[in-house]
Image: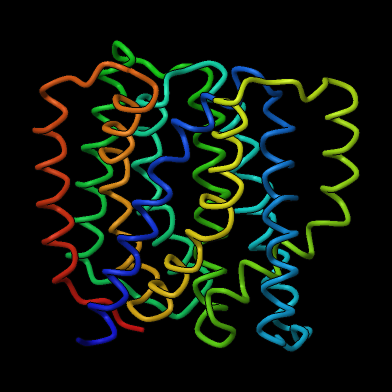
Amino acid sequence: MHNESKGMWLGLVGVAVFSLTLPFTRIAVAEFSPAFVAFGRAVVAAICALGMLWYLKAPRPTAAQFKGLVITALGVVVGFPLFSSIAMQQVPASHGAVVLGVLPLATALFAALRFSERPSLGFWIAALVGSGIVVAFALRQGGGSFHLADFALFAAVIAAAMGYAEGGRLSQTMGGQQVICWALVLSLPVLLPLSVWLGWRDGITASPQAWAAFAYVSLFSMFIGFFFWYKGLALGGIARVGQVQLLQPFMSLLAAAVIVGEKLEADNLLFAAAVIAVVAVGRKMAVRR
């Protein structure tokens, strides 16, 4: 199997893990504050990351890697969890899932602007068409307009795209496990006291369901999923593997129906089929690295 194909499969596993993030976040923020869910899950993951770095006997990051790790942490450890948690207090997980469908295009943009990846015109057309489909779906679900929470979701998209692109690049030299582990550990001195203060201020009494949801976003969404995702980006390329994310909104829609009990419309399947077709076309388009 070529590295590109391996990268696509690993990316798909990562996307499957991430697709459950919004439904479980919605369950968690029903009883916890959005900030506690965002920062607390990073603290739990960072504690696991410390153990992983010790087990791997990982070397300390270089000065150049440190800069990239800070950018990664701002994007996927702080920005995306915070903005998506805020949004999940106001809109259903199914709505958030389709708005986040523009994430592959944003990831490709960050990769093209910051690194040496140069997608072809055909690739950009495929990315624009796929993203247009999911944006149209979001507008259709919203009655022709965006909710205020959509602005939080768009901020989450920008943060995640920045973190995905930067982390994917670092994974080529550090490995996906070390990238997310170091990003989490670097964030711990700031997020630990914040989480303790938020827990003391708001209280952490919640149902077993809320704690289970918090555990998922802490261990899988914030930690394990990145092992597959960053390794996939490193092997297959940020812009190309990032297109697998076009499937995530529809995985999340199914998860929202099963986990949260949100209604799954029949026409969702038509949008999903259209997106899958665009991903297949975009995967065949040239991307210079």
Residue nearest the viewer, comparing 183 with 102? 183
Instruction: Tell which of 250 and 207 is nearer to you.
Output: 207
User: Image height check: is 29 above or below 39?
Assistant: above
- Residue located 69% across and 54% down the image: 74
- For the point 19% across and 47% down, the residue is 129
User: Colour mode?
Assistant: rainbow
Residue at x 47% of width, y 70% of height: 230
x and y percent of residue 36 in the render?
74, 32
Please indicate whether residue 50 sits to the left or right of residue 226 in the image: right
Q: Position of residue 242 (x, y in %)?
A: 35, 61
In the image, residue 191 above or below residue 166: above
Q: Quadrant of residue 131?
A: top left
Quarter of the image that includes the C terminus = bottom left
Q: Is residue 176 left or right of residue 82?
A: left
Looking at the picture, how far across and down is residue 92, in whole percent?
42, 19
- Please name whichever residue, 30 or 81, is drawn nearer the observer in this view of the structure: 30
Residue 18 vertical position relative to residue 260 in the rendered view, above or below: below
> Is residue 130 positioned above or below 137 on the image?
below
Residue 34 is drawn in which quadrant? top right
Q: Quadrant of the N terminus?
A: bottom left
Q: Residue furthest top?
A: 143
Instruction: Work out whether residue 159 or residue 16 is closer to the camera in this orientation and state it.
Output: 16
Q: Residue at x 63, y 63 (%)?
A: 72
Could you tell whether 219 is left or right of 141 in the image? right
The quarter of the displayed image where residue 83 is located:
top right
Name the spot of residue 127 as percent of width and height, x first: 25, 54
The residue lying furthest to the front in this view is 208
Q: Count the marks.
A: 0
